[in-house]
Image: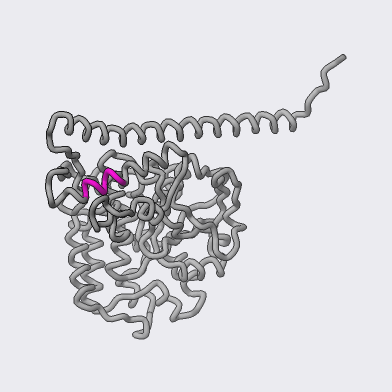
Amino acid sequence: MAKKKRSKKAVIKSASRKTRSTVAMKRKVSTRARAKDTSKKIESIADMIVDSAKKRANPHFEIPIRALSNIRFDPKKAIIEMGSKKQSRQFFDLGMAKKFMQTTLIASQCKQLIDAGKTASIRQMYYLCKHDVAGTKEKTFNDQNESDPIIEDLEVGIDSLREELHVYASNKGAMAGPITLVDDGNTLDCMKMGSAGYAVPSIVEPEIIQFKKCKARYILHVEKDTVWRRFYEDRFHQRHKCIVTHGGGQPARGMRRLLRRMHEELKLPVFCLLDNDPWGYYIYSVIKQGSINLAYESRRMAVPNAKFIGVSSFDYERCGLSDDVKIGLDDSDIRRAKQILAYPWFKGKKPWEKEIKKMIRNGFKMEVEAMINKSLAYLTEQYTPMKIRNKKQWLD
């Protein structure tokens, strides 16, 4: 009996299924390999402690120092990188014994999560590791402000990201625009996610999120959800074929990592529309060069080609704004502005020096919402398109 000939459509569909299956299998293999590697790194800490104890030596491990004194700016890569200075965390040292115990406790719990194939939030990690220290009235952790930095210490100590330790933070930030992605196996069209947009998760690695289809021309990142809402309601992402994102203030790691991935993998320019104040400048710096505290992650999170399009200190005169938009600078604003100006990645950049000095000279700062003082639609229909068109007004 002759074999029934399959239609071209059926063949393509079958091939597509096989491709998706192959990609999914590769992701699973990659995920397992990363988990195994991270688990071994944690085991190496335990082995080191055991070896020291056997030799009757002081158990210790090295933790890179996460501070301004131990970071450097690489002008070629245009990112902040961690230096080589380390702190020796020793068991037989009264000043370090508690942190030594806390680090091994967090490491042990992460190992359990990895081996079980489960994840926990940073808040859940605090409760998982909090208990009485045997024979004392002491707690392992008094509050989450103690456990969070230890998680970061472990990350940098074994050169593994928090996501690889199976620890995540709360979702923060959203986006909307002409992009379809796959999130944990679910296909989502970010043009059809409703008025809240696509909530960006803490873990956005390729094994969790894959980009399926994208028609966007660029990414516009705004500071606050209220500003994002203005752009969404005015359908800016639809009219200008772009992805509009917000980080709810300083963007969390999930948002920064996603911006980096979309910029790198989809070749999308990133424009930052932030408040005209030291905080807005700092947020831009974090997106572009990375943060001081998480310098060890800059290579995976920073977007060195990101551009600051506003709000600029010169926009008050340029846009004919009224005195109603002025917010007076206080001493802390001025002090912070001067600190930012002294950062190696700002220092020597004439346009930025001109920008920050102009703000100080003005004696006031402005929010993005200041543009709405002219009219509700001015921000989305005139100001932002004008800023994106006029490259001479961008700050790099």
Q: Residue at x 25, y 43 (%)?
A: 76
- 344 drawn magenta: no
- The image quarter in which residue 213 lies: top right
Residue 292 horizontal/vertical position (percent): 24, 53
Q: In the rendered view, would you say 327 is above or below 180?
A: below
Using the rendered image of the protein, determine whether residue 389 is visible from the camera's viewpoint.
Answer: no
Say which of 382 and 46 sits in front: 46
- The prevailing secondary structure element of the residues shown in magenta is helix
Residue 84 horizontal/vertical position (percent): 17, 41
Say which of 353 and 21 sits in front: 21
- The image quarter in which residue 239 lies: bottom right
Using the rendered image of the protein, determine whether residue 272 is visible from the camera's viewpoint.
Answer: yes
Q: Quadrant of the C terminus?
A: bottom left
Q: Is 263 displayed left or right of 95 in the figure? A: right
Residue 225 horizontal/vertical position (percent): 46, 67
Q: Is 328 displayed left or right of 367 in the figure? A: left
Write down the region rendered in magenta. Answer: 99-105
